[in-house]
Amino acid sequence: MTTPALLPLSGRRIPTLTPGVSSFPHHRATLRLSEKFILLLILSAFITLCFGAFFFLPDSSKHKRFDLEVLFRPINSQRRDADTERGPSVRTRIGTHYSLRDKIRADHERALQEAKEKLRKSKDELKAEIQTEKTKVAEDLKKKDGPKPLPPVPMPKLVGVNDGDPGDPDTKEKRDKIREMMKHAWDSYRQYGWGHNELKPLAKKGHSTNIFGNSQMGATIVDALDTLYIMGLHDEFKDGQEWIEQNLDFSVNAEVSVFEVNIRFIGGLLAAYYLSGQEVFKVKAVQLAEKLLPAFNTPTGIPWAMVNLKSGVGRNWGWASAGSSILAEFGTLHMEFVHLTYLSGNPAYYEKVRHIRKLLAKMDRPNGLYPNYLNPRTGRWGQHHTSVGGLGDSFYEYLLKAWLMSDKTDTEARKTYDDAIEAIERHLIRKSNGGLTFIGEWKNGHLERKMGHLTCFAGGMFALGADGSPDDKAGHYLQLGAEIAHTCHESYDRTVLKLGPEAFKFDSGLEAVAVRQNEKYYILRPEVIETYWYMWRFTHDPKYRQWGWEATQAIDKYCRVSGGFSGVKDVYSSNPTYDDVQQSFFLAETLKYLYLLFSGDDLLPLENWVFNTEAHPLPVLHMANITLPGSQNQG
Ligand code: DMJ
């Protein structure tokens, strides 16, 4: 093999040098004696310098060597050195030097050996090893920064968490049918959309909307848990619990709706905890709630509509009047936040909702009405629009339910509810020419004679609030509830599919029908059925079960597809198109209220349970015996 010649990058050859022979021969003869002497002098100076350096300069590696040596030396010899209070002997140092070199060599050999073994392993074996390693690291991290354990608090009295056998076989059969529908909705989601927020039942894949940002937090699983539980679908419940234990993670870079996350996730987790007693749901609810707290960092303490779960940055919907927050959103936190403080011992949650209530109490209300929009920077109302439907609805609902949930001790909430309802009755509730009672929308001093599907929940609310209403008006409010239930039933009955439109008018000869094409859809909403159920509980009038059964059959006939249940785009068309979304509230609310409608009243009795706005039951807290952390500081 020839030695390759040394080539520079340009490819030109460099002249080789022979030791002792100058490449410039004419200089050799010209070296004089004096020059030789100078050269000798330089050489001897250089040698002296080298000796000096060797003997006098400090040995910088000494300290390093010492440290390593202490690490690797046998314990006995370390003790000996410590006893003599001198540094390690030269012999030990030399020995260590060698043992260190040996150790490095041994380490290299071991690493080489391990690498060889790794290469011999199959891809799957390697994958499994990596996964184990990853899990271990994650667990170690969790142990280090894991959440503090929650304090033990007494479990409130839990009554009627299962069964509710209706007794007669006909009702039982109907209830079984509803249970079967729940199973179809769940199984389809399980098969095609598992872990996604919702399901596209026709495309047979996952679905999500902007209320959950770009997250994949299994909204349907969390929303459906308590329905599965009360229906006795225990395998499905366990499946959902397992997913939550292993996958539900809130450290995601997603901008979510504070309101939706509160009512669906926190409400769903709290209800699952109370029903099943499984700690994981409580822990997850508190973990998630912590992520919502930065949304309250506004100049007024009125929260932003949206918050990024990772960064904590909040903002409002672009479409809301002048950057406002929405009444039904910041006004629908109270129930869950009281429970969060109760369960976690952290006063922050209760303080946040108390602050909102105090701020609202101080504000002027046009005609005694609460506008839907409030600016969180200035603390001023936005447009003067008032609604008992979208943007306003659950604010009123939570005033009443805060009172009920406190075992009727939160009289401030009851009074606020009564005053609000009185103004609503005066300005928004009217009778149509055909004798239908409806709740319109107030827009800058003008009543729009239109009612939304969402507004239909108010029938149930009026009935629920009848007992305890001022001036002995219980009969009046129960009657009002019945009238709203009747109107909403008419909105269903006057369609081809016997399912209600999104909004319907009472104007120019029109009664309870949708006019605009974009108001003719039905997206599996629960509000009408919710009102049937409350009316049934308070009156036991069989027409409510009959109306509920009509709705069940219509949903099964027109919304059921092989991959689940879908909304429909036009309830006045005999051949409607699907919107291809199985909403999580269909499992949380619509099917739950139907099931309860065909169950005995001993299942989740209303004296012991209060349903949040997503139909998640929370137990009454007997506040006479409980002091919430932080409540002592409240005025
Ligand atoms: C649900 O998410 C809740 O009921 C909310 O209060 C408003 N409406 C939807 C279902 O229609």
Image (cartoon, grey):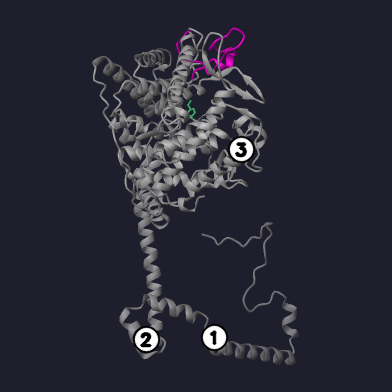
Q: How many residues crowd mark 2 within 10 Å: few (<14), some (14–19), many (20+)? A: few
How far apart, in angstroms, are the residues tagged by discs 3 and 1?
68 Å
Q: Position of residue 289 (x, y in %)?
A: 46, 44
**Mark 1 beta carbon near ligand 1 (under 8 Å):** no
Q: Amino acid at mark 3?
A: Asn
Q: Nearer the viewer, mark 1 or mark 2?
A: 2
- Magenta segment: does it hold 99? no
Packing grade of label 3 (10 A; few <14, some 14-19, many >=20) is many
N-terminal of the pair, mark 3 or mark 1, is 1
SS label for mark 1: loop
- Relative horizontal placement of residue 484, taking residue 366 as reference (left or right): left
Disc 1/disc 2 C-alpha distance (Å): 24 Å
Q: Is residue 302 left or right of residue 541?
A: right
The x and y percentages for residue 401 are 44, 34
Which one is in front, 523 or 610?
A: 610
- Please tell me the numbered disc located at residue 82: 2
Q: CA distance from mark 2 to mark 3?
A: 68 Å
What residue appears at the point 62 percent right and 76 percent down from the top-left corner? 19
Query: Nearest the camera: 625 or 300?
Result: 625
Magenta residue check for 500: yes
Identify the element where label 3 is drawn. Answer: loop
The residue singled out by tag 3 in the image is 316
First to last magenta residue range: 496-522
Amino acid residing under circle 2 = Ala
- Residue 422 is labelled as none
* Residue linked to disc 1: 58
| N-term-proximal mark, 1 vs 2 | 1
Instruction: Out of 358 and 102, give the one closest to the viewer.
Output: 358
Callout 2 touching callout 3 (CB < 8 Å): no
Q: Earlier in the sequence, mark 2 or mark 3?
A: 2
| Magenta-colored segment: predominant secondary structure | loop
